[in-house]
Image: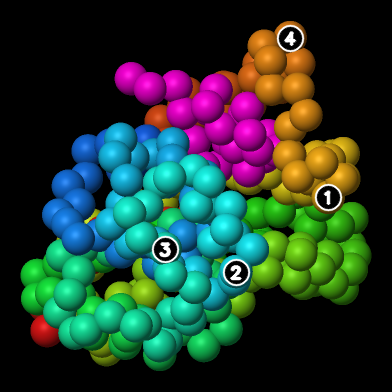
Amino acid sequence: MKDYLALHLRDLPYFRALLRAVEARFYKDISLPGPVLDLGCGDGHFASQAFEKPIEMGLDPWWGPIQEAAGYESYQYLVCAAGDHMPYPSDYFASAISNSVLEHIPDLDPVIEETARVLQPGAPFIFCVPNQRFLETLSIGGWLDRIGLSGLAKSYRRFFNRISRHYHCDSHSIWERRLENHGFVVESCWDYFPPAALHVLEWGHFFGLPSWISKILFGRWILAPSAWNLNCTDRLVRPHYERDPQSPQGVYSFYITRMIG
């Protein structure tokens, strides 16, 4: 099987690489009939690693990531547009994905309604998002709770949610109601990324500062993507990658839904 972790570590900060590598494995057994819409395609890196051939359409509201995505050649076409006003006819796409995107959208209902409009009846819509365990499982917040600083713990969780740009960390029941309101049915759902993996991601936001500086100065997260530079990082995060990705304590949820309208 393709080593998604090694591929992602060459290009991304280790905490983001771990999460994206785990998610990429989920797609290898999922059928995506074309034409496919990638809602919130970002810079195109994930699609370049997770899929063997270019996706028909990538859509994102930000021009900078769209320009980066063009360099990966992961899409046949790219469009810079908002998810609540897509420039496509109704019933156009045979499937859609949205990988770790929906949690960043403040007003979700118009986007899901628009996604339903552009999907054909029976089309699958696959996405993943953080769930209701995400904030409560953060290690620093938990430590502050244990020493009696619950107010500071709440402030830390709000801070981390803000730097993660999360507007939605919702339970399965909330997602099911939200989707059903727009004509989707949930066919399958599982939780992944257990607490230990989340702690790697959490601390990576702070230890990953050099990667952030590198991206600003040189346009690359990893300046030296060679084995000698990445071996130590690989050993650190690989145990989390090689564990069973599905976990009842997982802080992210993966949804396979279908348009029934």
Residue in the image at 64% along x and 20% along y: 234
Of mark 1 and mark 4, the one earlier in the sequence is 1
Distance in Å between CA atoms under marks 2 and 3: 10 Å
Figure quadrant of the N terminus: top left
Compute the Cα span from label 2 to label 1: 17 Å
* Tag 4 residue: 228
Find numbered disc 1 in the image and state the secondary structure of the residue it sits on: helix
Q: Residues within 10 Å of mark 1 (few under 14, many from 20)?
A: few
Q: Is residue 14 magenta?
A: yes
User: Closest to the observer: 101 or 91?
Assistant: 91
Mark 3 or 4, which is nearer the eye? Answer: 3
Q: Secondary structure at mark 2?
A: helix
Mark 3–mark 1 contact, CB under 8 Å?
Answer: no
> Does 53 appear in magenta?
no
Residue found at x 60% / y 76%: 167
Against 168, residue 223 (above or below) is above
Residue type indicated by callout 3: Leu
How far separated are the C-alphas under marks 1 and 4?
Answer: 23 Å
**Magenta segment main secondary structure:** helix
Residue placed under numbered mark 3 in the picture? 78
**Magenta part of the protein: which range?**
1-24
Lower sequence index among marks 3 and 4 = 3
Instruction: Indicate the position of residue 168 as horizontal and vertical percent values.
Output: 55, 74
The dot on residue 63 is: 2
Give how far apart the Cα atoms at labels 3 and 4 are: 36 Å
Judging by the rendered image, the residue that carries numbered circle 1 is: 216
Q: Describe the element under mark 4 as helix, strand or loop.
A: helix
Q: Residue at x 65, y 38 (%)?
A: 12
